[in-house]
Image (cartoon, coloured by chain):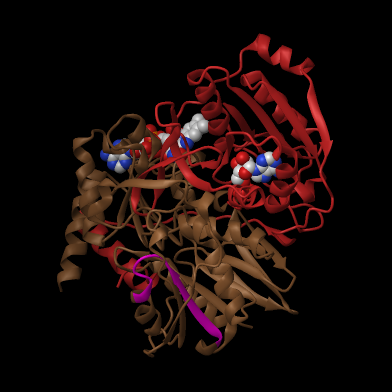
Chain colours: A brown, B red
Amino acid sequence: MTVLVVAERTGGRLAAASLDAIAVGISLAGTTAAVVGFAAGPGARESASDLGQYGLARVLVADDPSLEGAPPCAGAASVAAAADRVGADTILIGGTTYGRDLVARLAVKWKASAANGVTEVTPADGALRIRRPVFGGRATETRTLAGPRRVLSVRPHAFPPPPSAPASPTVEPLARPEDPAPLLGPKRTGVEATAAGLGPSLGDASIVVSGGRGVRTAENFHLVEELAAALGAAVGASRAVTDAGWRPGSFQVGQTGRSVSPQLYIAVGISGAIQHLVGMVSSRVIVAINSDASAPIFRVADYGIVGDLFQIVPALTAEIRRVRSA
Amino acid sequence: MEIVVCVRPVPEAETRLRVAPNGQTLDADGVKFVLAGYDESAVEQALLLKEAVAGSTVHVVACGPAPRTEEVLRASLALGCDRATWVEAPAEFAADSIRAAGAIAAVVRSPLPDLLLCGKQGGDDESGLFSGALGEHLGLPDLNYVTDLRWDAGTSRFRFQRATEAGAERWEAPAPLVVGLQQAWNDPRTAKLPNILKSRKATVAKVHADPSVPPGAGQPEKFELPAPRTGAKLIEYKTPEEAAQKLVRILREEAKVLP
Ligand SMILES: Cc1cc2nc3c(=O)[nH]c(=O)nc-3n(C[C@H](O)[C@H](O)[C@H](O)COP(=O)(O)OP(=O)(O)OC[C@H]3O[C@@H](n4cnc5c(N)ncnc54)[C@H](O)[C@@H]3O)c2cc1C
Ligand SMILES: Nc1ncnc2c1ncn2[C@@H]1O[C@H](COP(=O)(O)O)[C@@H](O)[C@H]1O
């Protein structure tokens, strides 16, 4: 099996989600030699040394400046050309907004079977068997991807990171295979980093701390944010909070907000309405802090503290800071 | 402006999920199907654009089996869409979003509309494959995770935002374009009774999905529900400090989610 892993850069380095894809690639193909890296766009060359840190010996780069600020679909032809160049049968991408979009384009362009957000991948009689959460984490599906080619995105945090195994990869430039003119029509004109610019973004974070109506006022919300800062976590909120305007809509977790699946989700003063649960039940470990022992959130949580958040949260923040500095 | 909205019938959010007897899929028996939440936003977005740009029409399209597909199309007509096309296909066909996108592409290809809207992901399989597959089938750019879409008549460009890991991105793009909506933060309207009654008699054009469109999302093998969570292990404590210490110790040593 030959795997092409697509490297995505964020903030000048390899996205955490791309490491997940590398880890899965190595576990499937067995040796790093059968896993080839690919990076496109400005800065692609720098990705080669990043990929080398995980033992990838061969990296293709398409450092095409026209891909700066272009939509994800504009890069699909380059990825398909890279896959053909190395004879890959499988393309793996981190499950970010960029990666998920690319998977859909490649499924049609590269005539592959496809799945987004997989949490398990196993070979099965020449095909691949994948598992992924569906219905907001309320169920799991297993599918077989038959046929000679497949393209997958890997759900963030679902796999341990690949071991470090420094190598100096050969770097091969790849020319733009076709003129993507119509695909270059859309232009990104700006980015406003979310207020969580202080910490990781909701979709990326391995820990999320969310506050609900129990926090009572916009001013009190800093209690949630300080706990998140101590943990290096992203900040989320229930709809009660975003509806009240205490925090913007981009913080909302749930059916009409974001779905998150971190390693650790801490719900502070959130009752656990079904519309909130569907956005976070697939988190690995859930902690609830709520003064009402009968709140439904305690039914899905792994650990609970029944108590007043105004006492518990500051004590927890202090304890985290204490062990972190020890 | 000619706008196409693609909608997918999905089980109501409150549905108690059950596994079908074959163990491979959701048991759809007795399940009520409705417009997916993101699709409600997509329909609302289409109607807002129609109201903003004189002479626009909204064409709603869905691929799937009877009766659920026809029902969500009529619900969309009741909300204010101008016409509806039902691309009839078996449930297994339509559940594969790449295949559904191929079947719908064949129907909307000529003449190409100015805008094709869909949800960022279905409320059921959450495959997130449809907008990209539709764009690729039609040779058009697609942008997913979009919010706050507007038409700027001065520059003849769509202007919108995208919610990505980097934050809120601002974009502009000429027509024609495929857009998957994150959540427009719009407040989807509800249909008025007279319009619901009218929609029952409205014409829904029906075509059969081209069976030669190849599948793309693989074969379902197993559908599983998680073991019911047994409920939280509650931490006993006398002081908030004790509660904090006990929780941090558990998270480090037992759950191993903190270093
Ligand atoms: C179509 C639809 C879509 C929706 N989408 C979403 C969504 O995406 N996300 C979402 O979150 N909601 C969504 N909702 C709303 C959802 O139904 C709930 O109303 C919402 O999640 C409640 O937010 P909450 O838990 O913060 O508030 P509440 O339900 O009011 O709960 C507050 C909790 O705080 C606790 N509390 C109070 N004081 C303290 C204290 N001092 N210490 C500790 N605990 C305390 C209370 O015991 C209570 O459990 C949606 C609803 C609909 C109808
Ligand atoms: N069978 C279908 N018919 C019409 N639209 C669909 C169909 N499947 C998916 N879509 C659209 O694509 C969006 C994303 O679905 P998915 O890619 O399956 O997660 C949905 O919200 C719909 O707008």
* Residue A188 vertical placement versus B250 (above, below): above
Residue A89 % position (x, y): 65, 76
Residue A321 % position (x, y): 17, 63
Q: Is residue B16 something that shows in the picture?
A: no
From the viewer's perspective, tell me whether residue A248 is left or right of residue B86. left
Q: Quadrant of residue B5?
A: top right
Q: Is residue A313 something that shows in the picture?
A: yes
From the viewer's perspective, tell me whether residue B141 is left or right of residue A234. right
Magenta residues (range): A34-45
A259 or A78: nearer the viewer: A78
Q: Residue at x 65, y 69 (%)?
A: A150
Residue B3 % position (x, y): 60, 30
A183 or A27: nearer the viewer: A183
B124 or B211: nearer the viewer: B211
Q: Residue at x 41, y 84 (%)?
A: A54
* Residue A81 vertical placement versus B105 (above, below): below
Q: Residue at x 72, y 62 (%)?
A: B218
* Residue A159 vertical placement versus B65 (above, below): below
Specify the quadrant that holds the C terminus of chain A.
Answer: bottom left
Residue B174 % position (x, y): 48, 39
From the viewer's perspective, tell me whether residue A57 is left or right of residue A139. left
* Residue A123 vertical placement versus A273 (above, below): below
Ligand 1 placement by image quarter: top left
